[in-house]
Image (cartoon, helix red, strand yellow):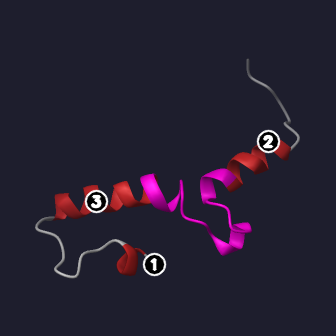
Amino acid sequence: SLKNEWVPATGYVSFSDAAHAITDYIVGYYSALRPHEYNGGLPPNESENRYWKNSNAVASFC
């Protein structure tokens, strides 16, 4: 979980520091790299990419 994996035991100095660090965690690790059991062990970004690659597009905007 976010609390166990990323938030320091001493907390953050400011709200801004917390917001920046947590955003980095979510964008840089949680969604991009961290495996999720629900997605068959894939990170959310990879799972979504595979979903869109394998889905039939209704329309194309080129």
Query: Mark 3 or mark 1, which has the lower sequence index?
Result: 1
Query: Where residue 36 sits: x, y (%)?
Result: 63, 70
* Labels 3 and 1 touching (C-beta < 8 A): no
At label 1, the amino acid type is: Ser
Query: Where residue 9 sits: x, y (%)?
Result: 22, 82
Neighbour tally class for label 2: few under 14, some 14-19, many 20 plus, Cα within 10 Å: few
At label 2, the amino acid type is: Lys
At label 3, the amino acid type is: Ala
Quadrant showing the N terminus: bottom left
Residue bearing the label numbered 2: 53
* Residue at image location 11% in from the left, 68% down from the top: 13
Q: Is residue 48 left or right of residue 51?
A: left
Highlighted magenta segment, given as a residue range: 28-46
Residue bearing the label numbered 1: 1
In the rendered image, the residue lying farthest to the left is: 13
Q: Secondary structure at mark 3?
A: helix
* Circle count: 3
Q: Secondary structure at mark 2?
A: helix
* Labels 3 and 2 touching (C-beta < 8 A): no
Residue bearing the label numbered 3: 21
Q: Secondary structure at mark 1?
A: loop
Where 22 falls versus 9 (above or below)?
above
Query: Mark 2 or mark 1, which has the lower sequence index?
Result: 1
Q: Is residue 61 magenta?
A: no
Residue nearest the observer in this picture, 37 or 52: 37
Query: Where residue 51 sits: x, y (%)?
Result: 77, 50
Neighbour tally class for label 1: few under 14, some 14-19, many 20 plus, Cα within 10 Å: few
